[in-house]
Image (tube, rainbow, N blue to C red):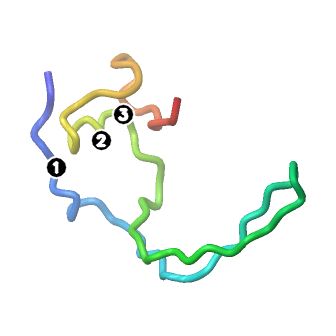
Amino acid sequence: MLKARHDHAEYPMVNIAAGHVELRDDRINATWTVELNSFLLAPVPVTNDFYCSILQQTVGRKEHPQAPVHNR
């Protein structure tokens, strides 16, 4: 059963300032700079349980609600 939806404002977020970052691809020996807008980032991993409470959908295994969400 899904839990009540959280307001993201309840969760402490860290503001990452806008700026530039240099990226590289060692396979082709190339570097380039991109501009990033500011964004919010969670200071700790987002768990499966927290993700589900915000988006009302599951990702990951139900038997591991405190495990971090990861890309597949």
Which mark is drawn over residue 6? Answer: 1
Which mark is drawn over residue 43? Answer: none
Amino acid on which the number 2 mark rests in the picture: Phe
**Residue in view at x 42 percent, y 59 percent:** 42
Where 6 sits versus 29, above or below?
above
Amino acid on which the number 3 mark rests in the picture: Asn
Label 2's element? Answer: helix
- Which mark is first along the chain, 2 or 1? 1
Residue 65 location, x and y as percent? 36, 28
Report crowding for label 2: few under 14, some 14 to 19, many 20 or more residues within 10 A (C-alpha): many
Residues at discs 1 and 2 in contact (Cβ within 8 Å): yes
Q: Residue furthest left?
A: 4
Residues at discs 1 and 3 in contact (Cβ within 8 Å): no
Q: Which residue is mark 3?
A: 48
Counting labels gives 3
- Which mark is first along the chain, 3 or 1? 1
Residues at discs 3 and 2 in contact (Cβ within 8 Å): yes
Label 1's element? Answer: loop
Front residue of 64 and 27? 27
Residue 66 location, x and y as percent? 40, 33
| Side (left or right) of 31 relative to 50 | right
**Residue in view at x 48 percent, y 81 percent:** 17
